[in-house]
Image (cartoon, coloured by chain):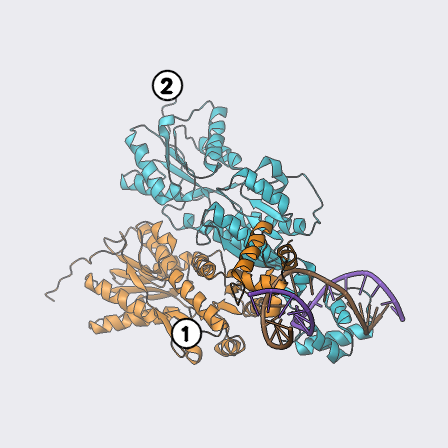
Chain colours: A orange, B cyan, C brown, D purple
Amino acid sequence: MVTIKDVAKAAGVSTATVSRVVHNGGQVGDECRARVKKVIEELDYRPNVNAQALVKRTTNTIGLVTPKLSMSFFGTLASGVETAARDNEYKLLMSNSLYETSTELDAINSLREHNCTAILLHSEYSDEQTLIKLTKDIPGLVIINRFIPQIGDRCVWLDNNSGGIQIGEYLIEKGHQEFAVVTSIYQNKDPELRVQGLKTALANHQLELDPDLVAESTANIEGGEIAAKALLESGKKFTAVVAYNDLMAIGAMNVLQDAGVKVPEEVSVIGFDNLFVTQACRPKLTTMSYPVEEMAAYATELAINLSQNKNKVKNRTHLFMPYLVERNSVAQAKVVDQTR
Amino acid sequence: MVTIKDVAKAAGVSTATVSRVVHNGGQVGDECRARVKKVIEELDYRPNVNAQALVKRTTNTIGLVTPKLSMSFFGTLASGVETAARDNEYKLLMSNSLYETSTELDAINSLREHNCTAILLHSEYSDEQTLIKLTKDIPGLVIINRFIPQIGDRCVWLDNNSGGIQIGEYLIEKGHQEFAVVTSIYQNKDPELRVQGLKTALANHQLELDPDLVAESTANIEGGEIAAKALLESGKKFTAVVAYNDLMAIGAMNVLQDAGVKVPEEVSVIGFDNLFVTQACRPKLTTMSYPVEEMAAYATELAINLSQNKNKVKNRTHLFMPYLVERNSVAQAKVVDQTR
DNA sequence: CTGAAAGCGCTAACAG
DNA sequence: CTGTTAGCGCTTTCAG
């Protein structure tokens, strides 16, 4: 391994000078700088990051703590972070938290041991107080996909309520009046926010959500199937089902189609997240897009700036909007008797 | 930040002693060790990893270089690596290579600057010579999902040929005799190996693959659609389509179903990889499972052992087998007139 | 069994 | 404009 000393010796200068030219910094004579640069090239010298970290007490490394990398959503998130990190000459250090508070905290500690000062955390289970305390301790910590008012300037999140409203408006515009909902319970607050948004949109059009047509289950394909079965068993009529997320929507479509109801001709289905699977199911799923990559990139730069103490604006929030992606699972509602 | 000195002072010992108890190493008096441990607890002392790396010239960090984390396959791979890494008290450092040789090499260099000595590389485009040279330079480098004979002991890979054979045998057993193939060109050697395996199986049963029923395109859903269209246009009859991977299989199913042919009743479709999407499409896809997580975990430990110079066995290869996962896209072939 | 001391590779005053 | 020097936090001989 070639060190700064080797370069210094070969170039006939001191290590300080080498350090200066490496960082394009300070005052170095042109002739001298050129010479050193040449030697660096020749020797293929690369500064030892650990040594730098030791003296600077920080690294060009961003840590990401996420429940499970193998889930499409988090993979995409991580990918966005990595890209933004690379653009800023940062590396990405990853930890799965497996949905556990303790693992989450361990991961963060471990990141800190690595002098990693910019950290992105997707936390669903840790309580707010824990997170608030954490942000106080770690200036470069950014919470992703969750909003905690007291530390609003450290949260990068999505307007789930708006997503719900957009879905409602869109479906109403398509002529739907009888809605069913397939939602989740055990998660964070996202499900209820989305349903709330939907209700708001309905209310704006003098429509209501029938409580019997709200089915809850787990936030995956099976959950969607279970919930949709409950919907069918209720015997009530509906022309559109709004799912908490894409996976539940797909489960719902399965059950509907297995029961012989045509999607979208008879019943429309709409998802949320715009995961890759929405392009693999039949029909392709109309959904609200969760701009994960964009949010990831934004959060990355925010965390980097915060960790370097150079973020300009203070006290501002970082809220992103979901947007509609039309595919084939929503159709115009059958015209119902409008003459009463 | 509490350092080893703080602990030493508080415990009334030297830093050397603290270091010894931290590593459970060497000879330290029981009483003394207990005292130091207590102080470590109280002060919540955590060794600075960068300082350790500096003196040890290595880190408990495994680097993973992968084309694109947002793709399901690589997310799962990364997740497997992270889990195995954590079990070994290693951290995971990630880089997307974006399918480019130069980015790939940059990533590896960057990893080395971080004193990261255990590295996992999924490389599709770099040529063999480059990789061979790399493995010579980096003892802890393991190539994943590719086999290069000269460095066979450094490759963790899948028997694609066997996968093809298994598919062939399975389909033949199901009564299929007329096969179509939807495969890819631009990738690595995997596609041709899988097709070769299929051909072998067919040959074992005095069957042949009609070259007109082999369609090539890109290895994604659209590619599968394009290729399947070509198949349909050939006008030739087939009862099973074997796809290079799950995505192409899904594309093929789309086209088939849009053309009014029932899957699997009229035509069976089989994929490869067992990605999550296989559970989201209709019908759910029968496929060969690529045991990525298992391979990732294995490769991780291999890389760690190699980097620590403590892998026991030499000159052995690390070959994994795919296995069949039955779902709903393959059916018994319609009985054809066997009486000639 | 424990401490002193050197040094890993680099940066950042401080001199000159 | 450039060199000297003192560490960053930790490990590891080498003495004792």
Q: Position of residue D10 (x, y in %)?
A: 70, 67
What residue is disc 1 on? A147
Q: Position of residue A107 (x, y in %)?
A: 57, 66
In screen coordinates, is B2 left or right of B64? right
Residue A61 vs residue B285, the one in the foreground: A61
Q: Residue furthest top?
A: B340
What residue type is disc 2 on?
Arg
What residue type is disc 1 on?
Phe
What residue is disc 2 on? B340
**Residue B297 visible to the viewer:** no
Position of the C terminus of chain A, as image quadrant, is: bottom left
Q: Tell me which corner region of the image, top left, top right, bottom left or bottom right, holds residue A333.
A: bottom left
**Residue B83 visible to the viewer:** yes
In screen coordinates, is A149 left or right of A105? left
Please, which chain is the residue tagged with disc 1 on? Answer: A
- In the image, residue A241 sits, relative to residue A128, either above or below, namely above
Residue D5 vs residue B65, the one in the foreground: D5
- In the image, residue B80 sits, relative to residue B169, either above or below, namely below
Q: Position of residue A273 (x, y in %)?
A: 36, 60
* Discs 1 and 2 carry the same chain letter: no
Nearer to us: label 1 or label 2: 1
Disc 1 element: loop
Q: Position of residue B69 (x, y in %)?
A: 46, 53
| Numbered disc total | 2
Please, which chain is the residue tagged with disc 2 on? Answer: B
